[in-house]
Image (cartoon, rainbow, N blue to C red):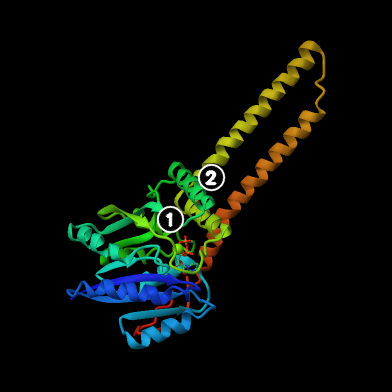
């Protein structure tokens, strides 16, 4: 029998886990021709999530729980789940029920047509703040114009993919992951379906402004060298400007015999150029920091213990 894996990361979600479990169980009921596995990666939660998951796993061998030993964040936790899954068809979704598991029927229809990756694109985003909506829009605009990989607008990490895609994705060992970029990068036959993004069933978003900014930076630095090109463009403009100014100064001095009164302009350029230079140094630092981290080749995540999984697989 073919296996379907539903893979969800979970961080402090004790108010939604049981409802999530009920919902996926009733979805699984409808597909008798498939075997199901429910992979949940507990990203070192500090609430009751751990106890709830273990209790559910005790009575249902389909529920495979990975308890990570330290919090690694949504993307890496999800990656740990993808790595441990064994499905012929895999679906990644949020445990807060913002991604309706009932969409499985549409995913399966596309996979039956021969697609390997099916992205779920949000038609609307219910229950999200205006700030989140605006920042998401800005994010996709910047990425669209700077990244080599065509990241799909309004697609989060709700998607279905086949086993060959899963096996490919887990070979990408970069530390700062941006999975929605990787899933486009790998190729295969891809398609998009649309859905209504629901409001959270309970609890609250774990994506603080800082985490959202970090994800955006990961997206930018992992898939684009545009920032480095930008440094080249701006610095060329800067020295051109300086050169023109120099010519003007020499012209005034030797043709008109007047020295330019320059204190204000000197300070202005000094401050401006130093600011730009420092910014660029920081930008270079961001790339170098990543090279350094990758060079350390630490494991991506590590596991405290698992439930209903035979073999431990440590990042
Ligand atoms: N999550 C995680 N580790 C974290 C933060 C979040 O595993 O450090 C999980 C969280 O439990 C949820 C998913 O990642 O299942 C998406 O997080 P959230 O719903 O807070 O993000 P949003 O939907 O608001 O973008
Ligand atoms: Mg959510």
Q: How crowded is mark 1: few (under 14 residues within 10 Å), some or many (20 or more)?
A: few
Q: Is mark 1 on a helix, strand or loop?
A: loop
Badge count? 2
- Residue 258 x %, y %: 82, 15
Q: Mark 1 points at which residue?
A: 126
Quadrant for the C terminus in the image: bottom left
Q: Position of residue 217 (x, y in %)?
A: 53, 53
Q: Is residue 24 visible?
A: yes
Q: Distance between the residues labelled 1 and 2?
A: 33 Å
Q: In this view, does 35 lie to the left or right of 224?
A: left
State whether residue 85 appears in this view: no
Pick the front one: 308 or 230: 308
Residue at (59% x, 33% y) in the render: 236
Q: Which residue is drawn at 37% across and 49% down?
A: 152
Q: Name the spot of residue 282 as percent of width and height, x first.
A: 63, 50
Q: How crowded is mark 2: few (under 14 residues within 10 Å), some or many (20 or more)?
A: some
Please say if 209 is above or below 163. above
Q: Which quarter holds ligand 2?
A: bottom left
Residue lying furthest bottom in this view?
Answer: 58
Q: SS at mark 2?
A: helix
Q: Relative to residue 272, is residue 311 drawn left or right?
A: left
- Quadrant of the rendered image containing residue 310: bottom left
Per the image, the residue denoted by label 2 is 227
Q: Can you tell which quarter of the image residue 233 is in? A: top right
230 above or below 115? above
For residue 137, which numbered disc appears in the image?
A: none
Q: Residue at x 58, y 54 (%)?
A: 286
Where is residue 234? Give x, y as percent.
59, 36
Q: Earlier in the sequence, mark 1 or mark 2?
A: 1
Which residue shows up at 77% across the image and 16% down it? Answer: 252
Image height of 70 relative to 199, above or below? below
């Amino acid at each position: 029998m073919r296996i379907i894996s539903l893979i969800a990361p979970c961080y402090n979600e004790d108010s939604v886990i049981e409802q999530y479990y009920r919902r996926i169980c009733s979805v699984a009921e409808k597909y008798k021709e498939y075997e199901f596995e429910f992979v949940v990666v507990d990203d070192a939660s500090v609430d009751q999530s751990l106890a709830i998951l273990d209790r559910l796993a005790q009575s249902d061998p389909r529920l495979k729980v990975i308890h990570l030993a330290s919090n690694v964040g949504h993307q890496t936790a999800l990656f740990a789940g993808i790595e441990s899954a064994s499905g012929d068809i895999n679906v990644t979704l949020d445990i807060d029920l913002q991604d309706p598991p009932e969409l499985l029927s549409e995913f399966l229809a596309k996979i039956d047509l021969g697609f390997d990756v099916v992205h779920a694109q949000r038609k609307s985003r219910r229950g999200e703040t205006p700030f989140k909506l605006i920042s998401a829009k800005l994010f996709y605009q910047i990425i669209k114009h700077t990244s080599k990989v065509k990241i799909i607008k309004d697609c989060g990490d709700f998607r279905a993919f086949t086993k060959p895609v899963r096996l490919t994705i887990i070979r990408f060992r970069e530390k700062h992951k941006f999975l929605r970029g990787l899933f486009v990068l790998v190729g295969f036959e891809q398609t998009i379906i649309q859905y209504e993004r629901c409001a959270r069933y309970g609890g609250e978003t774990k994506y603080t402004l800082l985490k959202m900014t970090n994800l955006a930076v990961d997206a930018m630095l992992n898939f684009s060298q545009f920032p480095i090109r930008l440094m080249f463009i701006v610095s060329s403009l800067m020295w051109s400007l300086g050169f023109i100014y120099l010519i003007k100064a020499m012209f005034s001095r030797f043709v008109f015999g007047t020295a330019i009164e320059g204190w204000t302009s000197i300070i202005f350029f000094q401050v401006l150029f130093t600011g730009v230079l420092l910014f660029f140094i920081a930008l270079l630092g961001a790339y170098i920091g990543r090279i350094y981290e990758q060079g350390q080749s630490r494991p991506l995540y590590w596991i405290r213990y698992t439930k209903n999984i035979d073999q431990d697989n440590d990042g």
